Amino acid sequence: MKRILISGGAGFIGSHLCERLLGEGNDVICLDNYFTGHKSNIRHLLAHPNFEVVRHDIIYPYTAEVEEIYNLACPASPIYYQHDPIKTTQTSVLGALNMLGMAKYNRGKILQASTSEVYGDPLIHPQKEEYWGHVNPLGVRSCYDEGKRCAESLVMSYHRQHGVRTKIVRIFNTYGPKMDINDGRVVSNFIVQALRGEDITIYGDGNQTRSFQYIDDLVEGMIRLMDDTPDDFTGPVNIGNPHEFTIGELAREVIELTGSRSQIVHLPLPEDDPRQRQPDITLARQMLGNWEPTVQLREGLRKTIGYFEEVLTRGGVRR
Ligand code: NAD
Ligand code: UDP
């Protein structure tokens, strides 16, 4: 049994990770300020004897005696991270400093949740870890992109300067049950719109691409990176599903799977919206024991549609 802290543990990815790590017999502390996370995501875990929840904002220091830290706290949806951009950068940078400080104090291991956004609007396709990216440092997405890039830099500095065992995962677009109904990201938006019979809102012409990964594949990859790689291996490692789709294709797939009569409408493309995104996962395959995404888009969408159908049956109220 390990003592593991998960910042952002009440969020979409964090709550799946809490569940999985508890299920494997670990002692888990979930740290969250509930900005985009929800108690309902972890309510079913509260009675578990090895689970603790702490309401805390990671821009302020926090210490607990833990062996491993998964630093996930940060809003991930463009709508939410642009809502208070200064706070987003504080969370990314000060939050990373505080979590790295705790890892150093404990002589523990830390995994930093980074993002494909560090590649910006990429000029190299698919994106390999060696690519330094093409980020607009002044744009509306920069609070998140540059915050996450600075966090990666801090992780490497703690590793080099203090010998902290660190891992960086660059997560590509991930979806699945427990996403917030109002999250604003494309998969949840399209499914909820389709189930409600509302217009499906494609931003721009819909020819921009993303590569969508189902949550279970991500959780598996993150745990393998933390547990199964040598201490001197820091990453970064791309974790994502390399199958690339246009946003228009995603909309049509969701309409077909839900049997919805929703119409597609086109709205303006947000500023600095990346045109294409696809992970090169060669390194993940090599370092994470032949890790591969196992859930393809149709299957993952079906599971996610089932989840949102249930939430909508309860009038949008989470259990
Ligand atoms: P999410 O918004 O569902 O979860 C983020 C969690 O962090 C929420 O529970 C929120 O309340 C909490 N949080 C935010 N600011 C905080 C603060 N200052 N102090 C404490 N808690 C705070 O998003 P998610 O999709 O679960 O993303 C989790 C992590 O993974 C983020 O760091 C995100 O950048 C990264 N990521 C996610 C994706 C994706 O596709 N889901 C892609 C790339 C990177
Ligand atoms: N998008 C869309 N309609 C929506 C939400 C998003 O067309 O209702 C587009 C968005 O412009 C982007 C892509 O879908 O091109 C993915 O957006 P998301 O916010 O999910 O994540 P991103 O990868 O941009 O961070």
Image (cartoon, helix red, strand yellow):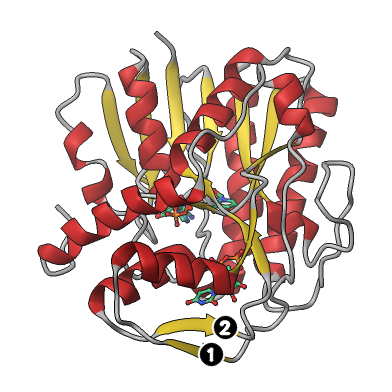
Q: Is 277 on the left-hand or right-hand side of 204?
A: right
Residue at (26, 59) in percent of width and height: 308
Q: Which residue is mark 2?
A: 203
* Mark closer to the chain start, 2 or 1: 2
Vertically, is 81 above or below 11?
below
Taking depth in this image into account, of 223 and 305 the one nearest to the observer is: 305
Q: CA distance from mark 2 to mark 1?
A: 6 Å
Residue at (68, 78) in percent of width and height: 140
The answer to whether residue 72 is seen in the rendering is: yes
Q: Is mark 2 within 8 Å of ligand 2?
A: yes
| Mark 2 secondary-structure assignment | strand
Q: Position of residue 304 (x, y in %)?
A: 34, 53
**What is the number of the mark on residue 58?**
none
Q: Amino acid at mark 2?
A: Tyr
Taking depth in this image into account, of 92 and 21 the one nearest to the observer is: 21
Q: Quadrant of residue 194?
A: bottom left
Residue at (56, 53) in percent of width and height: 212
Vertically, is 61 above or below 292?
below
Q: Quadrant of residue 291?
A: top right
Taking depth in this image into account, of 293 and 115 the one nearest to the observer is: 293
Report crowding for label 2: few under 14, some 14 to 19, many 20 or more residues within 10 A (C-alpha). Answer: some
Q: Is 84 on the left-hand or right-hand side of 47?
A: right
Q: Which residue is mark 1?
A: 266
Asked if the residue under mark 1 is in contact with the one under mark 2, i.e. CB atoms within 8 Å, the reply is yes
Residue at (84, 27) in percent of width and height: 161
Q: Amino acid at mark 1?
A: His
Q: Position of residue 74 (x, y in %)?
A: 52, 54
